[in-house]
Image (cartoon, rainbow, N blue to C red):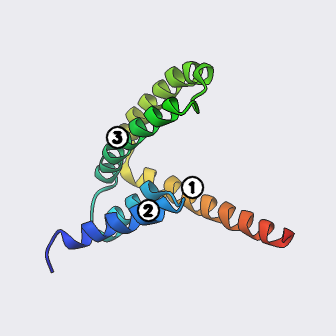
């Protein structure tokens, strides 16, 4: 099989799932680290490179359509930027094996919370 086919299909699949509301970036990280042999830090960098243009375009259209609360933006952007920078610096200093375990716990918790939310909503119908 052509070398690029599996990464292409992984990106296509995670992109399709993310259009349905599933976290495509998280799925892409899992695909790259578990199935494609990409290191954790490299996978996070690739994910960030794909996320930044998407976030910028989303921000543009949210502002254009009047969905951007300017006061919240002014308050959140500096603190969010500083926190992201601090998190990136900490993650670069940490051992990769230390990053995988909390990320796995986060994924399990997030999945369980989504399942429980769906079960509770199903009980009301």
Element type at mark 2: helix
- Residue 47: x, y in percent? 35, 50
Q: In this view, does 121 lie to the left or right of 17?
A: right
The single residue placed furthest to the bottom in the displayed view is 1
Spatial separation of the CA atoms under disc 3 and disc 2: 18 Å
Element type at mark 3: helix
In the depicted view, which residue is nearer to us: 23 or 86?
23
Name the residue: 44% across, 29% down: 86
Name the residue: 44% across, 62% down: 27
Spatial separation of the CA atoms under disc 1 and disc 2: 13 Å
Name the residue: 59% across, 63% down: 108
Spatial separation of the CA atoms under disc 3 and disc 1: 25 Å
Contact flag, marks 1 and 2 (Cβ < 8 Å): no
Name the residue: 40% across, 55% down: 97
Element type at mark 1: helix
- Location of residue 42 with respect to 119 vertically, above or below: above
Circle 3 is placed at which residue position?
A: 53
Let me know if residue 30 appears in the view: no
Q: In this view, does 81 lie to the left or right of 112?
A: left
Going from N to C along the chain, the mark reached first, 3 or 1, is 3
- Location of residue 40 with respect to 60 vertically, above or below: below
* Quarter of the figure that contains the C terminus: bottom right
Circle 2 is placed at which residue position?
A: 27
Going from N to C along the chain, the mark reached first, 1 or 2, is 2
Circle 1 is placed at which residue position?
A: 106
Q: Which of marks 1 and 2 is in front?
A: 2
The single residue placed furthest to the left in the displayed view is 2
In the depicted view, which residue is nearer to us: 37 or 101?
37
């Amino acid at each position: 099989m052509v070398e690029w086919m599996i990464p292409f299909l992984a990106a296509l699949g995670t992109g399709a799932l993310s259009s349905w509301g599933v976290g495509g970036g998280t799925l892409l990280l899992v695909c790259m680290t578990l199935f494609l042999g990409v290191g954790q830090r490299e996978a996070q960098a690739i994910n960030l490179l794909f996320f930044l243009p998407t976030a910028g375009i989303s921000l543009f259209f949210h502002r254009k359509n009047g969905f951007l609360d300017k006061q919240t933006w002014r308050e959140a952007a500096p603190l969010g930027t500083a926190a992201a920078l601090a998190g990136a610096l900490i993650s670069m200093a940490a051992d990769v094996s230390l990053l995988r375990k909390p990320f796995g716990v986060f994924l399990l918790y997030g999945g369980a919370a989504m399942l429980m939310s769906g079960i509770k909503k199903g009980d009301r119908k």
